[in-house]
Image: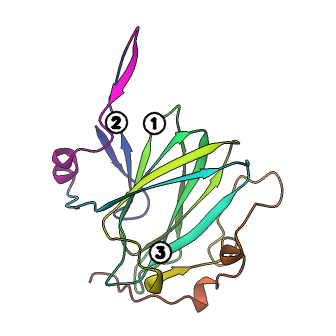
Amino acid sequence: MKITETSLPGVKIIEPIVYGDHRGWFMETYSDHWFKKAGISICFLQDNHSFSASKGTLRGLHYQLKPKAQAKLVRCTSGAIFDVAVDIQKGSPTFGKWFGIELSAENKKQLFIPSGFAHGFLTLTDNTEVQYKVDQFYAPEFDRGIIWNDPAIGIEWPLDGPPVLSKKDQNSPCLSEMESNFIYGE
């Protein structure tokens, strides 16, 4: 398993080793051993699976407040997505900065996003499935979001037209008005 740092501290690209032969392939998608070697001590509690029928579906930017903040390990198991993490830790040198990467069933890459970051993705194909592990259970009372197109963040979404959005995602606040209890270094 190859684990690579990104421009956002703590956000990491995970590339499983894929073993293939005439029958197909096999890979480990998560290994506590490899994560601990990379300095990630996480106990995942829940697996989530989403399906998006249409290319151009945008989900996010989502996060949960402390004490129910979630770290995530995201992968795309059918189709492709542009996956994004945004630093929302007050006082962080990368506050409001974003990192994006294509995750696909073909490239098998994953993105680890620690708590203190908002997360979102755009589907690049029809019939896209995304699976992700989280280290806290979903807690609706702690669930928050940031508007996907906030110019203060400036995410360069690879859009061909207007995205398909939920009402929640259409009405999320901008970065300057979001609720966050994440303090850099805590």
Q: Which residue is drawn at 71% across and 52% down?
A: 158
Residue 156 visible to an observer of this rendering: no
Q: What stretch is highlighted in magenta?
A: 21-38
Q: How crowded is mark 2: few (under 14 residues within 10 Å), some or many (20 or more)?
A: some
Q: Do the residues labelled 2 and 1 touch (CB within 8 Å)?
A: yes
Q: Can you tell which quarter of the image residue 65 is in?
A: bottom left
Badge number at residue 83: none
* Helix, strand or loop under label 3: strand
Residue hosting label 3: 63
Q: Residue at x 29, y 44 (%)?
A: 30
Residue 180's place in the image compared with 96, above or below, is: below
SS for callout 2? loop
- Whether residue 33 is in magenta: the answer is yes
Residue 51, position as x, y percentages in the image: 59, 50
Whole-percent x, y for residue 31 in the image: 23, 44
Label 1 belongs to which residue?
A: 108
Residue, disc 2: 16
Q: Which of marks 2 and 1 is nearer the N terminus?
A: 2
